Image: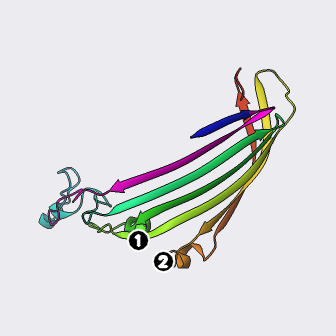
C-alpha cells in the first residue's frame, strides 16, 4: 500500500497477492450425507437423501489458486476522484456449480482465470450541509473471459455503473 498526499488531494495505491491451497478433502469421499429424522420420508431408502440440496464438495489435493489486485485512486483539486483497478483470480470448477446445484459430490479442480479491468470518475458536488456530502460518478468494467466461460458470459463482457454517492458524518474525506 502506498499513499502520497499532494496539494488539494492525495494518491493511494494498493498491490495485493493472495494464494489459496485446498485441503485434501473437505468431506470424506464415499460417505453419504444423511437427513435428520424429521426430514426423512416414510420410504426406508429416504434416509440416504442428502440433508442439503448441495453437500460440501470434495476437493482434489492440492490445488493452488492465485489472485492479484492492483488498485489506484487519486483525489485532485479537492473534488475530483479518479480510479483504476485490475483484478485477476484463479477459479475452480465450482464457479459453475450454480449451473448444476443438485450434484452431491463435485470435484474441485483448477478451471480458469477471471480478469476484470475497471476505471471510474466521481465529481464531488457542492455541499448542502456541513455533515453531508454528495458525489456523482460512473465506472466502467471490462472482463477478460476465458474460453470455458465465453459460452456463458460472452467473449468480452462489460459492465457500467452510474451512481450518486452520499457521505454522512463529520470527517467526510
110 left or right of 29?
right
Q: Quadrant location of residue 133? A: top right
Coloring scheme used: rainbow
Image position, residue 30 (x, y; %)? 15, 66
| Res. 28 mark | none
Q: Indicate whether 70 appears above or below 57.
A: above
Who's the residue at 60% across and 57% down the image?
86
| Magenta region includes residue 27 | yes
Residue bounds of the magenta highlight:
6-31
Locate residue 13 relative to residue 133 in the image: left or right: left
Q: CA distance from mark 2 to mark 1?
A: 8 Å
Magenta-colored stretch includes residue 56: no
Q: Count neighbours of disc 1 (C-alpha within 10 A) and say few if under 14, some if 14 to 19, many if 20 or more.
A: some
Determine crowd level at label 2: few under 14, some 14-19, many 20+ residues with C-alpha closer than 10 A: few
Given residues 43 and 77, the one toward you in this image is 77
Is there a contact, CB below 8 Å, between mark 2 and mark 1? yes
Q: Which residue is mark 2?
A: 148
Q: Position of residue 68 (x, y in %)?
A: 50, 56
Residue beneath the point at 31% across and 69% down: 103
Q: Quadrant of residue 128?
A: top right
Residue 100 appears in the figure: no
Residue nearest the viewer, comparing 31 with 137: 137
> In front here: 104 or 135?
135
Secondary-structure class at tag 1: strand
Q: What residue would you read off at disc 1?
A: 111
Q: Position of residue 38 (x, y in %)?
A: 21, 50
Q: Secondary structure at mark 2?
A: loop
Residue 19: which quarter of the image?
bottom left
- Which label's residue is closer to the chain start, 2 or 1? 1
At x 51%, y 79%, the residue is 147
Amino acid at each position: 500500500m502506498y499513499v502520497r498526499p499532494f496539494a488539494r488531494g492525495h494518491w493511494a495505491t494498493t498491490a495485493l497477492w493472495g494464494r489459496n491451497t485446498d485441503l485434501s478433502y473437505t468431506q470424506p469421499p464415499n460417505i453419504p450425507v444423511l437427513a435428520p429424522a424429521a426430514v426423512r420420508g416414510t420410504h426406508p431408502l429416504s434416509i440416504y437423501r442428502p440433508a442439503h440440496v448441495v453437500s460440501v464438495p470434495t476437493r482434489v489435493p492440492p490445488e493452488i489458486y492465485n489472485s492479484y489486485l492492483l488498485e489506484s485512486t487519486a483525489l485532485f483539486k479537492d473534488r475530483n476522484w479518479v480510479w483504476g483497478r485490475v483484478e485477476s483470480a484463479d477459479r475452480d470448477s465450482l464457479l459453475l456449480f450454480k449451473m448444476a446445484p443438485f450434484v452431491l459430490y463435485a470435484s474441485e479442480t483448477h478451471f480458469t482465470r477471471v480478469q476484470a479491468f475497471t476505471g471510474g470518475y466521481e465529481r464531488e458536488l457542492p455541499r448542502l450541509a456541513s455533515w453531508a456530502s454528495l458525489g456523482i460518478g460512473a465506472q466502467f468494467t471490462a472482463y477478460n473471459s476465458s474460453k470455458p466461460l465465453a459460452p456463458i458470459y460472452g467473449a468480452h463482457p462489460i459492465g457500467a455503473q452510474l451512481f450518486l454517492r452520499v457521505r454522512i458524518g463529520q470527517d467526510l474525506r
